């Protein structure tokens, strides 16, 4: 549908804006967030971005959603590492779902990679840099519990939402 070299027309920009707004609402308003843990369903519009726009533009869209969301609904100081997390997560959804049928395997793999890379590796690193949070068992137990609970939930939601999106019709419309 849209590669890095293709231009965004008004229709594509409007759809990207809508998906960015949905990401902000699901992340900042409807998500559960403390200083050290965040649970939200922002991955759903990010997956749709990935399906429609590919890794480059979905990474940009997820990064914009993070920056705009921080601008309007900041719950902590801005830290660019979390924007990098958003860009990586958005790009991964584009990598796994752009011009591809959503399958259980791809939904599970992208969730697993996001969980390992972002939830269990990068986010603890950023929290340690920002707040000098000790990376001890008490800290990891909360993150691991979240990962164990969210892995099947996120995989199932990605699969069912991905299968429900009329991808082929949208691909023709935006091609």
Image: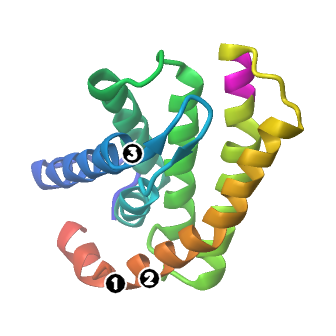
Residue at x 35%, y 38% (from the top left corner)? 65
Tell me the number on the disc at residue 160. Answer: 2
Which mark sits nearer the N-terminus, 2 or 3?
A: 3
Q: Is residue 128 magenta?
A: yes
Image side of residue 84 versus residue 162, left or right: right
Q: Residue 127 placed where, x, y %?
A: 68, 24
Up-down: is 104 above or below 111? below
Q: Nearer the viewer, residue 97 or 148?
A: 148
Q: Nearer the viewer, residue 110 or 7?
A: 110
Tell me the number on the disc at residue 25. Answer: none
Cα separation, mark 1 vs mark 2, equals 6 Å
Provide the residue span drawn in magenta. Answer: 125-129
Residue at x 31%, y 28% (from the top left corner)? 73
Work out which residue is located at the far left of the displayed protein and give it: 10
Cα separation, mark 1 vs mark 3, equals 22 Å
Q: Residue 37 placed where, x, y %?
A: 60, 39
Q: Quadrant of the N terminus?
A: bottom left
Look at the numbered discs 2 and 3 and tell me whether their residues touch, using CB distance below 8 Å: no
Q: Residue 64 placed where, x, y %?
A: 36, 34
Up-down: is 126 above or below 19? above
Q: Residues within 10 Å of mark 1 (few under 14, many from 20)?
A: few
Work out which residue is located at the far front of the displayed protein and give it: 138
> Mark 1 sits on what residue?
164
> Mark 3 sits on what residue?
27
Residue at x 25%, y 68% (from the top left corner)? 175
Cα separation, mark 2 vs mark 3, equals 20 Å
């Amino acid at each position: 549908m849209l590669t890095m070299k293709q231009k965004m027309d008004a229709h594509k920009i409007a759809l990207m804006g809508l998906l960015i707004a949905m990401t902000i609402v699901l992340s900042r308003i409807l998500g559960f967030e403390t200083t050290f843990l965040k649970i939200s369903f922002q991955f759903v519009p990010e997956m749709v971005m990935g399906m429609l726009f590919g890794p480059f533009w979905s990474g940009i869209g997820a990064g914009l959603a993070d920056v705009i969301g921080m601008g309007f609904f900041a719950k902590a100081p801005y830290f660019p590492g979390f924007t990098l997390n958003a860009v990586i997560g958005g790009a991964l959804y584009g990598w796994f779902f752009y011009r591809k049928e959503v399958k259980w395997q791809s939904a599970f793999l992208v969730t697993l990679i996001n969980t390992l890379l972002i939830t269990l590796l990068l986010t603890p690193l950023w929290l340690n840099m920002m707040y000098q949070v000790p990376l001890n068992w008490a800290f990891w137990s909360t993150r691991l519990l979240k990962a164990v609970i969210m892995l099947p939930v996120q995989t199932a939601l990605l699969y069912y939402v991905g299968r429900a999106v009329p991808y082929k019709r949208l691909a023709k419309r935006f091609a």
